[in-house]
Image (cartoon, helix red, strand yellow):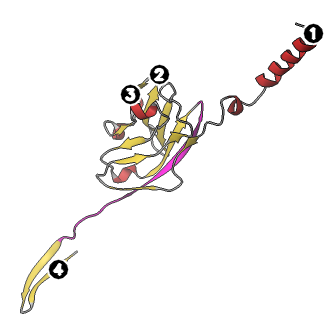
Amino acid sequence: MNSALNAHLVLSLMVFAQLPSSFTKGTIQVIGSSHPIVALVGDDVILPCYLNSSISASDETVEWTKYKLDPRFVYVWRDGGELESKKNPSYKGRTTVSISKLKHGDISLNLSKVKLSDKGKYRCLLPDMGETSVELIVGAVSLPGIVSVQKAKTGVALQSE
């Protein structure tokens, strides 16, 4: 190999080594929902989070956290498995990520049996790729309580609260 070609090759490798990691990894982004997710107490809900490329995230670390929660983790996937021991006790048995979807870049959180206390802002983080946040709004519906029943000439009158 001549010295001019050799010098060009070394220079090219030096430039490539100094490119930002986002360029060398491609343009992979973590995407959530720009709109809040709305659920009722008792519902099952999905908090969306996915990669803009359908590459597998099953070998990545995935962390779902909730702002102002201590301990903050609602779900952790690391080294090919869920770390249940890191999870906040109020979320045990209620959060999952689909392993088959994880292989296609879908890291959405499935939250079952939604509680009023679940409302708030959640963060989906892949430390090597980025993060996004999702807002969960939780509502409750209750039936009115009947206080009294009175018979009237035209029917029945119910008083409720």
Q: Earlier in the sequence, mark 3 or mark 2?
A: 2
- Residue on which disc 2 sits: 79
**Residue to which mark 1 is pinned:** 3
The mark nearer the N terminus, 3 or 1, is 1
Amino acid type, label 3: Ser
What kind of residue is marked 4? Gln
Disc with the residue nearer the chain's start (4 vs 1): 1
| Residue with the most extreme bottom position | 153
Q: CA distance from mark 3 to mark 2?
A: 14 Å
Q: Mark 3 = which residue? A: 85
* First reached walking from the N terminus: tag 3 or tag 4: 3
Label 3 sits on a secondary structure element that is: helix
Count neighbours of disc 4 (C-alpha within 10 A) and say few if under 14, some if 14 to 19, many if 20 or more.
Answer: few
Gap between marks 3 and 4, in whole Å? 50 Å
The kind of residue on which mark 1 rests is Ser
Which image quarter is the C terminus in?
bottom left
Q: Going by the image, does 87 lie left or right of 128?
A: left
Q: Quadrant of residue 84?
A: top left
Q: Nearer the viewer, mark 4 or mark 2?
A: 2
In this view, 154 is above or below 47:
below
| Label 1 element class | helix
Mark 2 lies on a secondary structure that is loop
Q: Are marks 3 and 2 in contact (CB under 8 Å)?
A: no
Spatial separation of the CA atoms under disc 4 and disc 2: 59 Å
**Residue 5: image x %, image y %?**
89, 14
In the current view of this chain or complex, which residue is farthest to the right? 4
Foreground mark, 3 or 2, reads 2
Q: Horizontal placement of 93 versus 70: left or right?
A: left
